[in-house]
Image: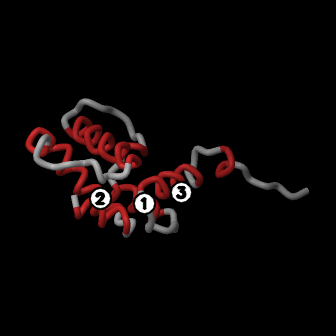
């Protein structure tokens, strides 16, 4: 629990993802042994993301969804586009969406007369 709170307070997306993977994989072992009362409610989406990533790796979820993409993959895509790779998961997702090639603003070309 201390590592979870530390990763959240320092905005360590990769470390947080590893902790969430551990929670998703060992949830039954953690139930009743670890109190999650001090965990911020905004981390529920991170826990659900870890569960969805586990299903995706097991073949249960298809597609190239940014919501369940691994932090390492998001950082690689951001780096390839020349964008900042720092920040939390939500910040990286927002940057990728803003700068995706399929977005209308990215595909618009300003033509001068």
Q: Are marks 1 and 2 in contact (CB under 8 Å)?
A: yes
Q: Whole-percent x and y of residue 76?
A: 39, 61
Q: Are marks 3 and 1 in contact (CB under 8 Å)?
A: no
* The label number, if any, that marks residue 43 in the structure image: none
Q: Whole-percent x and y of residue 9?
A: 37, 66
Give the left or right position of residue 34, taking residue 85 as reference: left
Query: How far is the residue under mark 1 from the one under mark 2?
Result: 9 Å
Q: Disc 2 designates what residue? A: 16
Question: Height in image: 18 above or below 27?
Answer: below
Q: What residue sits 27% from the left and 45% below the top?
A: 50
Q: Earlier in the sequence, mark 1 or mark 2?
A: 2
Give the left or right position of residue 72, taking residue 26 as reference: right
> Residue extending furthest right?
113
Q: Colour scheme of this structure image? A: secondary structure
Q: Disc 3 designates what residue? A: 95
Query: How far is the residue under mark 3 from the one under mark 1?
Result: 11 Å
The nearer-to-camera label among 2 and 3 is 2
Query: How far is the residue under mark 2 from the one under mark 3?
Result: 19 Å
Q: Disc 1 designates what residue? A: 88
């Amino acid at each position: 629990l201390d590592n979870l709170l530390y990763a959240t307070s320092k905005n360590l997306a990769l470390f947080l993802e590893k902790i969430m993977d551990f929670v998703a994989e060992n949830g039954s072992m953690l139930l009743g042994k670890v109190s999650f009362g001090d965990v911020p409610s905004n981390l529920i989406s991170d826990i659900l993301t870890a569960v969805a990533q586990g299903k995706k790796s097991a073949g249960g979820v298809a597609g190239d969804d940014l919501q369940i993409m691994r932090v390492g993959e998001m950082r690689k895509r951001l780096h390839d586009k020349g964008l900042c790779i720092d920040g939390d998961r939500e910040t990286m997702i927002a940057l990728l969406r803003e700068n995706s090639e399929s977005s209308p603003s990215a595909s618009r070309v300003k033509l001068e007369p």
